[in-house]
Image: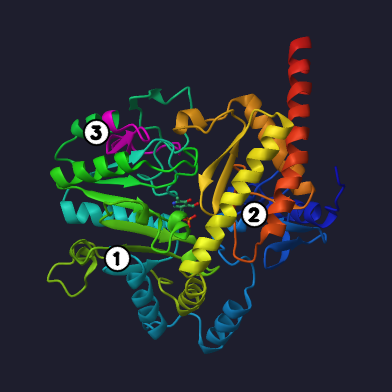
Amino acid sequence: MKTEKSDRSRKLYERAKRVLPGGVSRNAVFTRPHPTYGMTGAGCYVTDVDGNRRLDFANNVASLIHGHAHPAIVEAVTQQLRQGTAINLTSEVEVAYAEYLTARSECFDKIRFVNSGTEAIMCCLKAARAYTEKPKIAKVEGSYHGIYDYAEVSQASTPKDWGEADHPYSVPVVRGTSSSVLEEVIVIPFNDTEHALSLLDEHTGQIACVLVDPLPHRVGMSPASAEFVEALHGWTRQNDALLVFDEVITYRLEYGGAQDWYNVKPDLTALGKIIGGGFPVGAIAGSSEVMEVLNPLADKVLFPHSGTFSANPVTMTAGYTAMRLFGAGEVARLNALGDIARKQIAEAIESTGIPACVSGAGSLLRIHMKPSPPRNYREAYPAPSETRMIRTLLDYMFRNGVMMINTCSCALSTPMTQKEIDILTETLHEGFLKAREAASESSVAVSVQ
Ligand SMILES: Cc1ncc(COP(=O)(O)O)c(C=O)c1O
């Protein structure tokens, strides 16, 4: 294993711990014994403060479709910075970008920009309530939708608290979460149409929307089946509820988002990540009829909504530039590269004999220390031995110049080519051997205890 320098990161962390809880502002970047401090990013490579350079398959948790510091984005944003970053007026670039995104996806009649994926999801749920006048929402067990109280229910449930598979409990994430929040969130099992529908039926007349991510990362990163999505859509039509898609991550998967996979369309979609071109962003898009709840021209505004930095011209400029550079041809090229990556990873798994597998679609993939792709959150939930192997693998990859998302996932970016996929899979090959070695050492240690 390569040794790498980490003095400056270690020292920065000593300072950070004194002023930031646990030394960080986002748990996603926390690692032991200390986080690594970034210095620069260019294309698909990042360099940390100690001078270590790594190939970046994390892409800030799938938010950078063009990697780092794309020249056209830097140029456009630099020009905008000189003209002002946040003015208490609306802007031309906001209109142009809204025109562009609504033309890109079939069911986006109207769009409203916000500042994060969390905020986009929160706004979708509030808009659904305002439109239907109903309080409850339904979501898939284990699905991550950010940190709004209702959206985060059961995103991290465990075998100790998750209840029966066909009737999952609503499990809080934060201590002190109101019991009314838990009562108002119906947790449904992923891709299990029969049980999902029967759970929804228990709350007929009370559900504002069913929230679904078409490729839920924490649920195992397998696609929501057409049967499941169509059944949920059908249920919402019969019960005056809305279908909401979380495409904060999956919008990258097709020109018009992963919703292009299905014959039925969501009423509302939450967006984020790549549409910000590297800057904080979120958006809620959907049919004119539902989006009307946000309309300030209405006699009574059903969902009054504002946000100091929403649609700021820097984010709008960066996002508009980035998305125009990610046309249908680039989407297809990156998806094809993802197919190659999954194939090569499967070959590396086979040749090392490790009990692992790879899931995902298009430019997103996830490795599991399980012999076959998990079909739902409970199957995706890693056993302690699997967690140890994943940690060993991620640590090996990081020390050997490849950054991945901490769930052992990768999000590709457009600067990548076959060369980067080969580096990923060759490093993974070695990492699998190390993870297997670590697993057999720990099982020996356990058996001699
Ligand atoms: C599917 C999904 N929805 C929502 C969010 C929340 O987005 P943000 O971190 O921008 O608040 C995330 C973040 O990773 C996500 O993966």
Q: Residues within 10 Å of mark 1 (few under 14, many from 20)?
A: many
- Is 327 above or below relative to 374? below
Quarter of the rendering occupied by the C terminus: top right
Nearest to the observer: residue 74 or residue 348: 348
Q: Residues within 10 Å of mark 2 (few under 14, many from 20)?
A: many
Return the mark for residue 197: 3
Q: Residue at x 69, y 29 (%)?
A: 354
Query: Which numbered disc, 3 or 2, marks the residue that appears first in the sequence?
Result: 2
69 relative position to 117: left or right: right
Determine whether the residue tagged by mark 1 lies in a helix, strand or loop: loop
- Residue lying furthest top: 448
Give how far apart the Cα atoms at labels 3 and 2 are: 37 Å
69 relative position to 316: left or right: right
Where residue 64 sits: x, y (%)?
57, 63
- Is 292 above or below relative to 154? below
Q: Residues within 10 Å of mark 3 (few under 14, many from 20)?
A: some
Q: Amino acid at mark 2?
A: Phe
- In magenta, the rendered stretch is 173-194
Residue at which label 2 appears:
57
